[in-house]
Amino acid sequence: MEIAEVESVVRGDAHFVQLRTSDGLTGVGQSACWGYPTAVHAVVETFRPYLLGADPNRIEHHWHHLYRMGPFRGSVLTAAVSAVDLALWDLLGKRLGVPVWQLLGGRVRDRIRLHLLLGGTGSEALAGQAAAAVADGFTAVKFDPLPADYADVSLARLVAETEATTAAVRDTVGPDVDLLIELHRKLTPLQATTVVPALARHHPLLVEDPIQIDSVSSQAEVARRALGVPMANGERLHTIWEFKELLAQGGAQYVRPDVGLAGGLSHGRKIAALAEAYHAAVVSHNCLGPLLTMASVQLDTVIPNFVTQEYSPLDDRLADGPARACVRRDGGFLPVPQDPGLGVTLDLTDETPLDLTGRPLTRIPLRADGSVAYAV
């Protein structure tokens, strides 16, 4: 039994991998470097000569071989490794007739708590979406409270409007719902150390990614200076070595690995264990649909320091799409899947491009003076 076919497919901003073995099994995976899916595809193509004829059960060995093939690093490489890694775990689970979480140590929980991504802007829209989410059974919601013109308003206005929007959501949902504040890397470090403390009175579960991810040490420094507000980082980090530096420099916080970017389940398990050693919790990142959600759930099921799984409305909309999960959402929770492998059926016969992110990559915020808002 060996890997007989490696299929790498790009559908719009989605990238999938299927590995087929000589005895007829198919394992599926997906990458999460959504900005550059064709680049990830090209890397998987370079993996092909190595993977063909290989024993699919040597998952850890293949991870290191693929990652160390060339002296290069970055999200495109780790996304490609992640997609292959997920497909290998899917194959192993299917071969043994068990869900992947059974192979990772067995479940520590009976269901997976979700937090819903809210897509609105402004206090009225976000409060309304939050109320609907709570009515649907969610116990946690995630949203971006920054004003639309955040790049050009004064610091005083930035703080006031961000705090007012957060207050509107908190007042709507009450104290029994967790708020996850997503700042989308929009602030400078100096803005962050003023904006974030202003949100403390609303007791957010966490505030995520206030600054650009160019520097691990800068992210850690902001976390240290957050004045009692729990911070979350890591959805764009790639390896255990980056997470180690973040935790060592910034202390206990919420880590946000994405199994489609940070090395698949093989590496995700290690990141969770590393976080556990720092008394840090895991809030798994994913916004790209059912396949990666189900892969994340395999990890969420087995780690003791899991808190909540990111869940996008996209998962509901794509429930009958190309990647079909074996379980459906029950209010604000997902049941632990029992199907072998990842619990996903992938059908790529429809070649219609998927739009998972909702924006052209070239469309980014500019300041009123024409400069790039993300540059600082």
Image: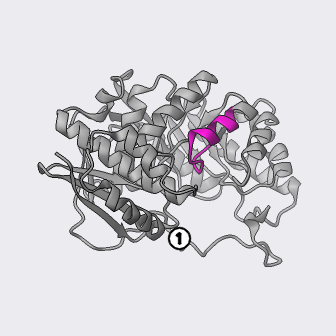
Q: Quadrant of residue 288?
A: bottom left
Residue 318: x and y in percent read 32, 57
The magenta segment: 233-247
Is residue 171 in sight in this rendering? Answer: no
- In the displayed structure, 252 sits above or below 167; it is above
Task: Give above or below for 154 relative to 24.
Answer: below
What is the x, y in percent for residue 97?
17, 34
Relative image position of residue 210 (x, y in whole percent): 72, 49
Q: Is residue 240 magenta?
A: yes
Q: Is residue 334 left or right of residue 166?
A: left
For label 1, the crowd category at 10 Å Cα-Cα, with few meaning under 14, some 14 to 19 and many 20 or more, is: few
Element type at mark 1: loop
Residue 76 at x, y percent in the picture: 51, 60
Point out the image quarter for the N terminus. top left
| Circle 1 residue | 359
Residue at image location 30% in from the left, 74% down from the top: 352
In this orientation, which residue lies closer to the viewer: 223 or 240?
Answer: 240
Left or right: 273, with 87 as reference point: right
Is 194 a magenta residue? no
Specify whether residue 53 is in view.
Answer: yes
Asked whether, in this view, residue 243 is left or right of residue 32, the answer is: right
